[in-house]
């Protein structure tokens, strides 16, 4: 039976000393499980990177990196790393302190822009819109991070600005990008993927308000909430992208740019100046 016994000693090796509200052992176990989901999805996509035609790998490459970042950040959180102590302002006014895991914001700073980029590329919307959505999603994460580390009620102003960024991103991906996707005949697949992304995004303001913002639910409870959302926003979305992508024509969608092709003239210009090709016929040679 000892073969089946497993001890999670993360909180013993890296004890959460200092804060009043800390991660529990059950919470650490949950985070290891979420990390395993990200790692499994990463390995699946990495395998597909070697089996998919090079011209069809743009989403494989994008989500492989995103999943790797998620795996690393969840490893840090499960091991009780990547946090600092922040004094809380809540309705009780008891001045309690909380473990603030900045590692999850690093994950979001990669995950949200990556999802925005993927949806923009698929819909064939303008690059102006894609870049705008990337910066808006990044600003969303940054304002929430700043709000989490603000020890006064002014944190809710930052929360409001971050939530406004989410509204702008949702309007763009559900409206403007949908219209662009319909023009190239891929509106059904786009709306499925956009709905999954936006369903997870709409719950992040709620989870933040209950946890790092309002200090209403504890560290473990907040990680259960965030963990479910993160698995939906990245591993589930990434695998759904790859499943639907198997029937897409990347050339028609203008997405076949992950393959680099050398034209004959490129090869010739790459040769040193004055060099040539040699042709041997019998005992004669021509340069």
Image (cartoon, rainbow, N blue to C red):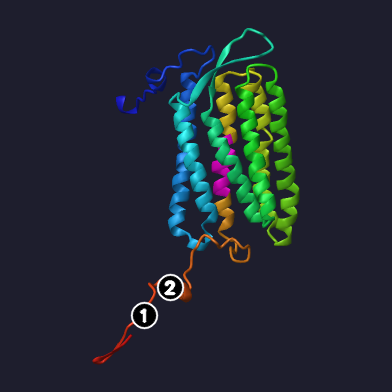
Q: Which mark is residue 253?
A: none
What residue appears at the point 40 percent right and 22 percent down from the top-left corner?
10
Image quarter hosting the N terminus:
top left
Across and down, in percent, residue 13 comes to 37, 20
Left or right of 256, for residue 176: right
Outermost residue toward the top in this view: 94
Question: Up-down: is 53 above or below 38?
Answer: below
Q: Position of residue 178 (x, y in %)?
A: 73, 52
Q: Earlier in the sequence, mark 1 or mark 2?
A: 2
Q: Residue at x 44, y 32 (%)?
A: 75
Q: Residue at x 49, y 47 (%)?
A: 64
Q: What residue is disc 1 on?
A: 276
Quadrant where the C terminus is found in the figure: bottom left
Question: Is residue 214 shown in magenta?
Answer: no
- Taking the image as shown, residue 215 lies to the left or right of residue 261, namely right
Q: Which residue is mark 2?
A: 267
Left or right, 127 with respect to 35, comes to right
Image depth: mark 1 or mark 2 in front = 1
Q: Is residue 41 above or below residue 242?
A: above
Q: Is residue 280 left or right of residue 26?
A: left
Residue 118 location, x and y as percent?
60, 50
Residue 231 sits inside the magenta stretch: yes
> Are the residues tagged 1 and 2 within 8 Å (C-beta)?
no
Residue at the far left in the pictured view: 283
Q: Which residue is located at x 56 percent, y 27 percent?
A: 224
Query: Quick one: SS at disc 1?
Result: loop
Badge 1 crowding class, 10 Å Cα cut-off, few under 14, some 14 to 19, many 20 or more, is few
* Residues shaded magenta: 230-240
């Amino acid at each position: 039976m000892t073969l089946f016994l497993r001890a999670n000693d993360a909180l013993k090796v890296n004890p959460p000393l200092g804060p009043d509200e800390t991660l529990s052992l059950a919470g650490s176990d949950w985070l290891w499980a979420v990390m395993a989901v990200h790692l499994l999805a990463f390995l699946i996509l990495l395998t597909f990177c070697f089996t998919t035609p090079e011209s069809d790998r743009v989403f494989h490459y994008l989500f492989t990196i995103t999943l790797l970042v998620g795996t690393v950040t969840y490893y840090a959180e499960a091991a009780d790393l990547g946090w600092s102590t922040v004094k809380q302002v809540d309705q009780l006014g008891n001045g309690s302190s909380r473990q603030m895991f900045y590692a999850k914001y690093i994950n979001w700073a990669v995950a949200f822009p990556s999802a925005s980029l993927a949806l923009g590329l698929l819909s064939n919307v303008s690059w102006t819109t894609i870049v705008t959505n990337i910066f808006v999603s990044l600003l969303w994460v940054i304002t929430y991070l700043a709000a989490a580390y603000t020890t006064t009620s002014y944190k809710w102003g930052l929360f409001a600005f971050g939530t406004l960024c989410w509204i702008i991103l949702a309007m763009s991906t559900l409206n403007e990008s949908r219209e662009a996707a319909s023009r190239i005949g891929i509106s059904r697949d786009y709306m499925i993927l956009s709905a999954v992304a936006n369903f997870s995004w709409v719950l992040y303001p709620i989870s933040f308000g209950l946890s790092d913002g309002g200090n209403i639910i504890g560290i473990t409870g907040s990680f259960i909430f965030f963990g479910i959302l993160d698995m939906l926003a990245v591993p589930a979305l990434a695998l759904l992208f790859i499943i639907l992508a198997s029937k897409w024509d990347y050339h028609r969608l203008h997405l076949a740019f992950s393959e680099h092709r050398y034209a004959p003239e490129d090869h010739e210009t790459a040769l040193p100046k004055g060099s040539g090709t040699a042709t041997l016929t019998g005992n004669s040679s021509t340069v």
